[in-house]
Image (cartoon, rainbow, N blue to C red):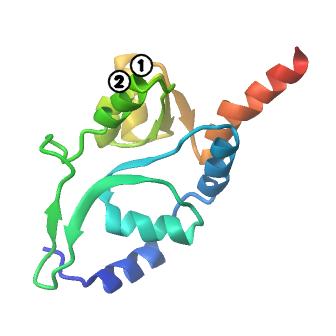
Amino acid sequence: MVRLSQPEALAFLEAHAHVDPAFAPFVRSAHAHGARVSVVSAGIRQVIGPALERAGVDVPIFANDVDFDPAGWTMSFFDASPLGHDKAVHVEAARAAGARTVYVGDGISDFEAAGVADAVFAKEGRALERFCRERKLAFTPFSSFDDVRSALWTRASNAEQRL
């Protein structure tokens, strides 16, 4: 049972957890190329939001909620799926709306979404990378969002310049 207040929890996370510094430039680049970016997480929206705000990122967040009761936190999961958030639903909705879907992830909660995305980036050395390799799913390994940004737009720009 976690018994920290919201300010205590946010202070702890600010000191110990950080957003990839390349994420804000990635989001700016995505927007400049007409792409939409959303954070789809099995984490806690009230924690993710302030972290993204500190990093200078403003994107939609789809994640679980929590009641920061000092007697013990109570989670409200995004849906009734086994992991509390079926991320594949978001990818499928974007595809149904006509978007090309690019999924960037690292963990167990990303497995289903990786299976339905048009393109997948899996963090090197993490569970999603192992899952994709074992199941022979096409993916691009990455270590930071600079790698993702480069793969999506720098290579495309270079190819256009050669034409």
**Which quadrant holds the C terminus?**
top right
Q: In which quarter of the image is the N terminus?
A: bottom left
- Residue 17 visible (yes or no): no
Residue 34 coordinates in the image, percent (x, y):
64, 37
Please tell me which residue is depicted at 81% across the width and 20% down the height of the picture.
Answer: 159
Residue 161, disc:
none
User: Where is residue 123 shown, x and y percent of the image?
Assistant: 49, 41
The residue carrying mark 2 is 115
Query: CB atoms at circles 2 and 1 under 8 Å apart?
Result: yes
Q: Which of marks 2 and 1 is nearer the N terminus?
A: 2
Label 2 sits on a secondary structure element that is loop
**Which residue appears at 83% of the width and 21% of the height?**
160
Q: In which quarter of the image is residue 154?
A: top right
Residue identifier under label 1 = 137
Task: State the residue at coordinates (33%, 68%).
Answer: 46
In the picture shown, does residue 103 fall above or below 12?
above
**What is the distance, in whole Å, between disc 2 and disc 1 at their CAs?**
7 Å
